[in-house]
Amino acid sequence: MTDVKTSGRKAVAKAEKVGPEFIGKTPDDEAQQLEALHVRQTQLVEQFGDGLPWHPDHYEAAIRSELRRGCEAFLRAGRYLMVARECAAHGEWAGMLDRLSMEPRQAQRMMEAARRVALLPNASRATHLIEATGSQSKLIELLSLPEDQFVELAETGTTGQLELDDVDSMTRDDLRAAVREARADNEAKDQRISQLSDNLNKEHEKTAKAQRKWKQATPDEQQLLLEHAVTDAEAAIIADLGGAKNGLLAAVVLLGEHCDTNNLDCSAFLGDVFGRLLNAVRTVRDHNSVPLSIPVVHDVGAED
């Protein structure tokens, strides 16, 4: 019996694939890169696009419109430029800047301004910064500040000697000079911190070297090291006692001369001073942590 389904017909052979193997297939690594790019573009549109979906014509028109307005519009244009630079196809970005009659450096400044203001943690401070700045040119001058100083100025109203409330009354040249001085103050502070860090590192290395030297020394050599520490402390005390022009001796001589000239008596006061000094030395000599008996030498004030 003839099969009704195949009667009078021949089975059609399965179609063969033709053309390059890569047609219709994206390599995994390239697919991941495209997905990452899509995510980043979507994030930029959400963060800086103010809800405007990406299309080069739409963003070019929006940027052109904002360029005709004030400082806030200048920042919005910078936000749109950030989206356009990231999302534009190859060659599209340069063409957009050309049609906008905008130099790449100008676009970079606008994007940097928008990025810095958008990253400020306090929206009200950001608004105050924009209002105090008042113009695009002054805002661009503030971009010469390091990022941490820019944030400090917005958040606290001051950085170095630059006050945010004074910016509105400054000329652009005055502001440029003030920004330069603020940067110099900050650089000087950084240099002081760096020097302090270097000094601490040197002290640490010195201490580490002394510890290694101590561990490698014999008991007799360790005793010499400890004796040097004692004589160093002794020398520092003697230096503080001073000579005829400085230290304790000079101060005592001046006081004595003053009392002698004016028929005043300061002997009791000075007696108390030297009594305290001698007692301090005896306290060290007789301290119960010292595990040996230190002989009394030339101590006329000591008890028999």
Image (cartoon, rainbow, N blue to C red):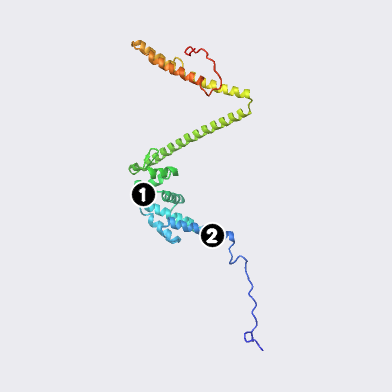
Place of residue 293 in the rendered image (x, y in percent of width and height, measured from the top left)? 55, 18
Please state which amino acid type lies under the numbered disc 2: Leu
Q: Is residue 208 visible in this depiction of the protein?
A: yes
Between residue 233 and residue 201, name the one nearer to us: 233
Q: Is residue 91 above or below residue 297?
A: below
Residue denoted by label 1: 124
Place of residue 267 in the rendered image (x, y in percent of width and height, measured from the top left)? 38, 13
Quadrant that contains the N terminus: bottom right
| Mark 1 crowdedness (10 Å alpha carbons): few <14, some 14-19, many ≥20 | few
- Asked where in the image residue 205 lies, by quadrant, the reply is top right
Q: CA distance from mark 1 to mark 2?
A: 37 Å
Between residue 263 and residue 33, name the one nearer to us: 263
Q: Is residue 230 above or below residue 79?
A: above
Place of residue 126 in the rendered image (x, y in percent of width and height, measured from the top left)? 38, 48
- Asked where in the image residue 165 lies, by quadrant, the reply is top left
Q: Of all residues shown, which one is farthest toward the front?
A: 304
The secondary element bearing badge 2 is classed as helix
Q: Of all residues shown, which one is farthest toward the bottom?
A: 1
For marks 1 and 2, give the one nearer the viewer: 1
Please state which amino acid type lies under the numbered disc 1: Ser
The secondary element bearing badge 1 is classed as helix
The residue sitting at 56% across, 59% down in the picture is 32
Q: Which mark is residue 34?
A: 2
